[in-house]
Image: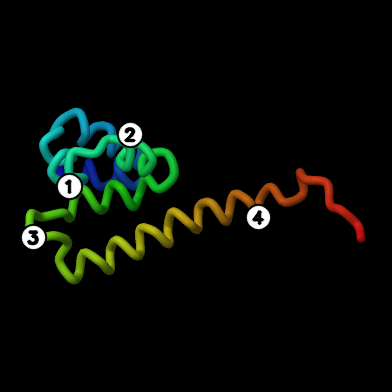
Amino acid sequence: MGCLFGIFGGLFPRLAVLLIWLARPVLFTAAFGGAWLLPILGIIFLPFTTLIYVLLWTPLGLPPLGWLWLILAVLLDLGGWGSTGYANRDRYVRRRA
C-alpha cells in the first residue's frame, strides 16, 4: 500500500497532499503549527516540497537526512516551474531593442 501511495504521490502530488490532509489532519496541524495559509500556499506552488515536509516531519523537527530530501523536493518543484517557462518561451512576443 505504501508503494502505491508513493507512485500516486509522485504522479499527483497535490492530490496526495490533500488526501493526507483529509485522512490525518492532526499530522498537518502538528507539522505546520496550526497555520492554514502556509499549507495551502504549499499545495498551490510547491506541492512536492509540502508532501515531503509533512511525511518527514517529527516532533523534534526534520532529521538531517530529511533536509536533503526537502532540498531535492524544492529543486523538483522549481524544475517544474522552469521547464514550463522554457517550454512556453515561444508563446510570448519578444521585444527587440
Q: Earlier in the sequence, mark 1 or mark 2?
A: 2
Q: Is residue 19 above or below residue 76?
A: above
Q: Nearer the viewer, mark 1 or mark 2?
A: 1
Q: Are marks 4 and 2 in contact (CB under 8 Å)?
A: no
**Which residue matches tag 3?**
60
Residue drawn at (48%, 57%) of the image? 78
Q: Earlier in the sequence, mark 1 or mark 3?
A: 1
**Which residue matches tag 1?**
31
Give the residue at the far left of this rendering. 59
Residue drawn at (17%, 55%) of the image? 56
Q: Earlier in the sequence, mark 3 or mark 2?
A: 2
| Spatial separation of the CA atoms under disc 4 and disc 2 | 25 Å
Quadrant housing residue 18: top left
Secondary structure of the residue carrying numbered label 3? loop
| Spatial separation of the CA atoms under disc 4 and disc 3 | 39 Å
- What amino acid type is highlighted by mark number 4? Tyr
- What amino acid type is highlighted by mark number 2? Leu
Quadrant containing the N terminus in the rendered view = top left
- What amino acid type is highlighted by mark number 1? Ala
Q: Are marks 1 and 2 in contact (CB under 8 Å)?
A: no
Q: Nearer the viewer, mark 3 or mark 2?
A: 3
Q: Nearer the viewer, mark 4 or mark 1?
A: 1
**Which residue matches tag 4?**
86
Secondary structure of the residue carrying numbered label 4? helix
Q: Indicate the position of residue 3 as horizontal and vertical percent values.
A: 20, 47
Quadrant housing residue 92: top right
| Spatial separation of the CA atoms under disc 1 and disc 2 | 18 Å
- What amino acid type is highlighted by mark number 3? Leu
User: Which disc, if any, is residue 15?
Assistant: 2
For disc 1, the neighbor class at 10 Å (few under 14, some 14 to 19, many from 20) is many
